[in-house]
Amino acid sequence: MAIVNVKKMSVIALRRNKNRLVELLQRLGKVEIIDIKEKTPKEEWDSFFMSRETSRELIELQGKLSDIQFALDFTARYSASKKSMFAGKPVYREEEMENLSGSQQLWDVIRECRELESRLNGLKSEEMKLGNIIDILKPWESLDVPIEELKPTHKVIIHPGTLPANSVERVKQLLTEKAPESSLQVISSDRELAYVLLVYLRSLEDGVSEVLKENSWSRADLPQLEGTPRQAIVSVEEKIKEFAEIRREIGEKAVKLAESRPQLEVLFDYYSMVINRVDAAGTAGETRETFYMEGWVAEPDIDSIRQAVLKKVPEAFIVIGEAGEDDDVPVVVDNPRLVEPFELITDLYSPPGRNDIDPNIMVAPFFFIFFGMMISDAGYGLVLALLGFFALKTLKPEGMARKLFGLVVLGGVSTVFWGAMFGGWFGDLIKIPAVWMNPLEDPMSLLVFSFILGVIQIYFGLGAAAYKNIKSGKVLDAVYDQGLWFVFLSGLIMFVYPPLAGTAKILSLAGAAGLVLTQGRSKKNIVGKFTSGLLSLYGVTGYLSDVLSYSRILALGLATGVIGMVINTMAKMLGFNIIGYVLMTVALIVGHVFNIAINALGAYVHSSRLQYVEFFSKFYEGGGRTFNPFRLKTKYTNLLNEEEI
């Protein structure tokens, strides 16, 4: 398969039917809406269309969605029933969802969630304040004087305060000298501070102030509570206990509200859907009686979309046109079902550009082979394939997640095949002879085989580059830039087999001569042409480096097998009695799970790297934008799509 041709669809219809059309397009899920206002000059827009303010409606809807999301987050903390990750989404008709949106009971639930959260925040704030009061009073706990009595009188001043712990005795001595009619009582102390109660006659204030200033005195402002500090602490702790009871009551109410969570989820999906519609409708241009919309459609879907639109909006006028040179055209690829999971590899690198060819059909077989060879353990492959299949059947993922689990299944199948070829079954835990060869006994054969696979993929890359040039009408470029390299490299490879040395010499010399004569063709003078052509031969080192990169297939395959054998050996050392057999089983499970995880990740990364660096560098540009159709997007539910019934 290849990249699907994408056309621009323009629709003009009566303004009163705009919402019907937008709803239809959302249900079809086959049109990517174009925001024509963004690409139209303001003067031109104002001369053709009326200005329509949709932001207020959007803000109101988004506010409601925000309230619903808040209620969902709040009730999630109190929901007694937890959803199983394997549970499917409930299915609703839009009419059912719309009816829920008008349920005052649900909006009351949302309001109550706000109120309870506000009360909880208030309790939390008060608890923090009370906790701070306790922290302040703790050092004064042994003071047996009521806090309300720690006030200056007409003749006596009473101050609680702090001093550096190492200066208390010095301060006492100075006060004895300068203010003999004073008292400094240490209430408590820690490593840094002493908490003291200072009492002195008001007439001695100047002398006392001088002493305190010189010794880092800090007055303590105790909370204005009744009773001694200890009594105040007990009183505050009682209040905190009361808050705990209030919090329990709030929790009970929240649990009751959480029973409405399934309906809130439906409400969330409904408003998400409506917001998307309003947003899409805002991209249209409007006159007094009509509206105009544009969108990208895949060519195979044009007829079905046209029929659906005319059935829903009979007066609609539809024009299908080609994309302009400056248009940001999305990319749609159409691949067989077995190839679709491998689209993930390409998309993570970069979707195909407008003038690219779809590489997925070529990536699929090579990635499939490389992944399996890099793990090369049939037991591990069975685990991966079963896990991926189980995830596909139970989670029913969509989009990228579906491709990922599909990739795990196919990678597992490949791993089973190559594991059987190489005799790997959970390391050497299960003794089944290799169908082909044991890489641990004959690593050189596997290394040569890896290089052969690398050469084949590089040739595919050259072929793809030649195809692109021919498709663009650059036939000579395909001959000079890919054909001559194919001849030159083939000649060099043939030298490995002595009986073909004569043919190899002819091909390599012919290819080299052709490259020298053609690779500098863009230069203006003969010297520049010849020099550039001669230097182009240095590119052979790049191809050699690319081929050597495929040695990672051997390296990862050996690593998986060796680690598996080490795990088995270490686990078997534990199996000397009943407890030992239990420990051995645990060690085998944990060890092999770890080995599967780390080597599956390594196989994915390195197989992808071979595609990105060694393969894509020959022909693939990327830089495209994936087709993003306007469609139904739900998080908690599935909408019954009448357009597909």
Image (cartoon, grey):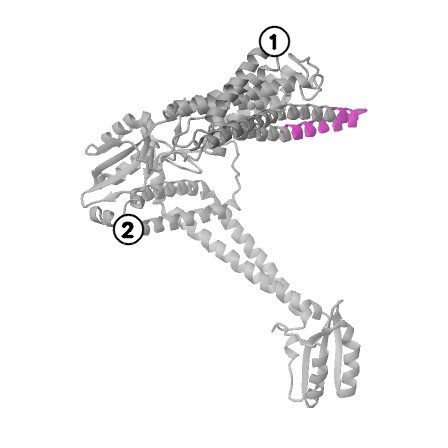
Q: Nearer the viewer, residue 500 or 27?
A: 500
Task: Work out which residue is located at the far top of the displayed protein and give it.
Answer: 499
Residue 97 in sight: yes
Residue at 42 percent across and 47 percent down: it is 68
Q: Nearer the viewer, residue 33 or 426?
A: 33
Specify the principal SS of the magenta part: helix
Could you tell whether 525 is left or right of 307 in the image?
right
Span highlighted in magenta in the image: 568-596
Q: Amino acid at mark 1?
A: Pro
Q: Position of residue 146 (x, y in %)?
A: 67, 75
In this rendering, position of residue 90 left or right of residue 196 = left
The residue at which mark 1 appears reads as 499
Quadrant location of the C terminus in the rendered image: top left
Residue under the point 31% across and 42% down: 35
Answer above or below: position of 500 versus 44: above
Q: Inspect the image, locate mark 2, and give the three-letter code of the amino acid beneath it.
A: Glu
Instruction: Identify which residue is drawn at 41% across, 34% down.
Output: 626
- Mark 1 lies on a secondary structure that is helix
Quadrant the N terminus occupies: top left
Q: CA distance from mark 2 to mark 1?
A: 80 Å
Residue 335: tell me if it is visible.
no
Image disc number at residue 643: none
Q: Is residue 441 magenta?
A: no
Percent position of residue 174, x then y: 77, 83
* Residue 351 horizontal/vertical position (percent): 44, 32
- Please tell me how crowded label 2 is: few (under 14), some (14-19), or many (20+) other residues with Cα within 10 Å: few
Instruction: Give left or right: position of 271 versus 139.
Output: left
**Residue at the spot of label 2:** 53
